[in-house]
Image: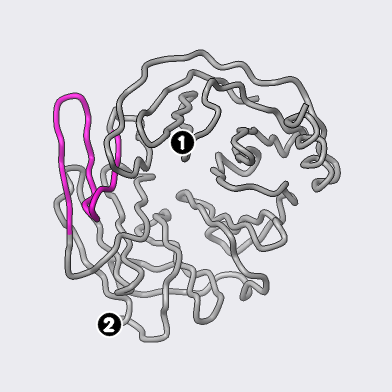
């Protein structure tokens, strides 16, 4: 009853979205999770973790690690291209690129390039570029990491940003009033939707996202304006990650994988 009431209240925040049936899942394997932060997995069978500020990539046969103590805490990791992984250290305004065995390819201190760039969000873009959100100017930038040149795209963002995510062609953000936007590499900005309140979120593409609230996991399909509740066994969880019809739910003790097809 409590979940039903909460779900109806949640829907009231998002005009135009309707409730549909629950999404069924099929339980797969369960793995123990030691005391570490699970980031997610790629399409090549590799899992990614952070423990004691050491970034780890691991599969069934091998394990690789990367650490850079002088740069402090790892802020973010982007492995949209698993052959060129990006590690961001916000405290030192520094971006590290790694190869598929976590060997360092390039180290970029953005202050050395332009002292007006204060990156707070980064991501891998297409055409040898990084997405950068410059907190100083509230501007989204494209940075060419081969030429060490950058350009601002779009206008400065007026609202505070709650969440960002990117792929090769789009940079997504959700602002403090839960408006979900996308900007492409040509600078075209699109308001995709106003979404419900959330605690954790993962953007799948410009039509779908997953979000959780009150330990319930939902799928929002913006194209058909529908929100689905996803059926999982876990009554509480720390986070989740979805890719290629596999949903990983992780607690502080284990990772449980489910097979699911998003509508």
Residue extending furthest toward the front: 2
Tell me the residue at 81%/48% (across/down). Answer: 13
Which is more foreground, mark 2 or mark 1? 1
Residue 65 at x, y = what percent?
A: 16, 46
Coloring basis for residues: one colour
Q: Residues within 10 Å of mark 1 (few under 14, many from 20)?
A: some
- According to the picture, the residue beneath numbered tag 1 turns out to be 241
Residues 23 and 170: in front is 23
Q: Is residue 132 above or below residue 179?
A: below
Residue located 22% across and 35% down the image:
58
* Disc 2 target residue: 112
**Left/right of residue 77 with respect to residue 210 in the rendered view:** left
* Sequence order check, earlier mark of 2 and 1: 2
Identify which residue, 56 or 262, lies in the foreground.
56
The reply to whether the magenta stretch includes residue 75 is no
| Residue 54 is a magenta residue | yes
Count numbered badges in the picture: 2
Residue sticking out furthest to the bottom: 115
Q: Picture quarter containing residue 212?
A: top right
SS category of the residue bearing label 1: strand
Q: Position of residue 196 (x, y in %)?
A: 72, 46
- The tag on residue 148 is none
**CA gap, disc 2 to disc 1?**
35 Å
Which region is colored magenta?
A: 47-67
Q: Is residue 96 above or below residue 45?
A: below
Secondary structure beneath dot 2 equals: helix
Pinpoint residue 25: horizontal percent, then vertical percent.
Answer: 56, 17
């Amino acid at each position: 009853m409590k979940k039903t009431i909460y779900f109806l209240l949640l829907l009231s925040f998002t005009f135009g979205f309707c409730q549909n049936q629950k999404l069924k899942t099929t339980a797969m394997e369960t793995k123990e999770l030691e005391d570490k932060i699970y980031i997610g997995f790629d399409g090549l069978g590799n899992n990614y973790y952070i423990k004691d500020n050491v970034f780890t990539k691991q599969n069934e046969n091998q394990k690789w690690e990367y650490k850079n103590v002088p740069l402090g805490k790892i802020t973010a990791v982007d492995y949209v291209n698993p052959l060129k992984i990006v590690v961001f250290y916000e405290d030192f305004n520094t971006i590290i690129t790694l190869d598929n065995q976590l060997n360092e390819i390039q180290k970029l201190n953005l202050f050395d390039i332009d002292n007006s760039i204060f990156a707070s969000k980064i991501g891998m873009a297409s055409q040898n570029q990084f997405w950068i959100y410059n907190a100083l100017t509230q501007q989204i930038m494209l940075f060419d990491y081969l030429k060490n040149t950058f350009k601002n795209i779009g206008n400065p963002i007026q609202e505070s940003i709650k969440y960002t995510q990117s792929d090769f062609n789009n940079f997504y953000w959700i602002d403090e009033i839960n408006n979900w936007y996308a900007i492409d590499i040509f600078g075209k900005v699109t308001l995709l939707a106003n979404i419900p309140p959330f605690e954790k979120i993962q953007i799948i593409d410009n039509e779908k996202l997953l979000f959780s609230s009150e330990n319930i996991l939902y799928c929002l399909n913006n194209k058909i304006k529908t929100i689905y509740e996803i059926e999982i066994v876990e009554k509480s969880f720390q986070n989740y990650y979805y890719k290629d019809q596999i949903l990983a739910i992780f607690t502080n003790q284990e990772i449980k994988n489910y097979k699911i097809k998003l509508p």
